[in-house]
Amino acid sequence: MTRSDFLRLMAGGLASALLARPLAASAAAGYDFWFTRLRYDSGDWDVDQRTPSNIVTSLIDYTTLRVDPKEHVIALSDPKMLTAPFCYLAGHKLVEFSAAERRNFERYVRNGGFVMVDDCNHDIDGLFARSFEAQMAKIFGPKALKTLPKSHGLYRSFFKFDDGPPNTGLELNGWGDDLVHDYLKGIEVNGRLGILYSNKDYGCEWDYDWRNKRFLAEDNTKFAVNIVMYALSV
């Protein structure tokens, strides 16, 4: 059973119990994928507003997935988020989960969910990175967050990225150390990558209106397609 199969079953049960209408309606409409942005109370979660629509457009262009064209924004504290096949969490500032946010985040990841976390890294002191990593240490343990090797299936799930994660030119202070990294990090649970942690500000890159400004060599959301396809296939 793939992650998406498991979450689809979970969505059915949870929808009945909680009347989770927005996300349950997406599943009922026969979509394979819908983009869910997590709203958390402590920081600036609402960043890079064109990112979801650009990713959705690329998924429609390159894949045969049945994709909901709408972005779904849902509070991390709301159990409805447990029905999503893919979640996105980003920001520049403090990440300090409430008890309900922490409980849902852990339950979602441990039960097969996938969260992409993007450090927008424009803060001087690495506040997002330091605070998010502290939350992960509390939930999953201090050694859970690990470097992903370039051989990871994420880099070959659709397009091939033989050199690992593509750079963006926007990695200003990712993870608070003023370095450009040639790797991403993640947390695996039961052999599945449940959290992908980026310091490259992919959200800002994917927010760019590249379709109307054609001087870019190619679609900058191709790696996002890889991430989604990986998330749905394992």
Image (cartoon, rainbow, N blue to C red):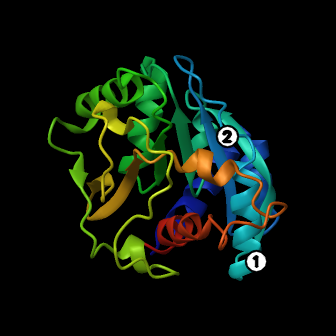
Above or below — where is 44 with respect to 152?
Answer: above
Q: Position of residue 169 (x, y in %)?
A: 49, 51
Earlier along the polypeptide chain: callout 2 or callout 1? 2
Q: Which residue ends up furthest to the front in the rendered image?
A: 215
Identify the residue shown where x is 57% and y is 63%: 224
Q: Check the picture and name the quadrant holding the N terminus.
A: bottom left
Above or below — where is 174 with respect to 197?
Answer: above
Q: Which residue is mark 2?
A: 48
Q: Position of residue 5 (x, y in %)?
A: 54, 70
Q: Position of residue 78 (x, y in %)?
A: 61, 30
Amino acid on which disc 1 is placed? Asp
Front residue of this view, candidates 228 and 74? 228
Rate crowding at label 2 as few (under 14), some (14 to 19) or many (20 or more) other CA atoms within 10 Å: some
Amino acid on which disc 2 is placed? Asp
Above or below — where is 38 with respect to 28?
Answer: above
Q: Check the picture and name the quadrant holding the C terminus.
A: bottom left
Give me the C-alpha separation between circle 2 and circle 1.
21 Å
Total marks shown come to 2
Q: Position of residue 141 (x, y in %)?
A: 18, 36
Identify the residue shown where x is 54% and y is 72%: 229
Identify the residue shown where x is 82% and y is 64%: 29
Above or below — where is 131 with respect to 63?
Answer: above
Secondary structure under tag 1 reads: helix
Q: Which residue ends up furthest to the left in the rendered image?
A: 143
Front residue of this view, candidates 104 and 144? 144
Residue 136 image label = none
Q: Which residue is mark 1?
A: 61
When asked about the image quadrant of residue 82, the answer is top right
Rate crowding at label 1 as few (under 14), some (14 to 19) or many (20 or more) other CA atoms within 10 Å: few
Please state if 151 lies on the left or on the right of 159 as rendered.
left
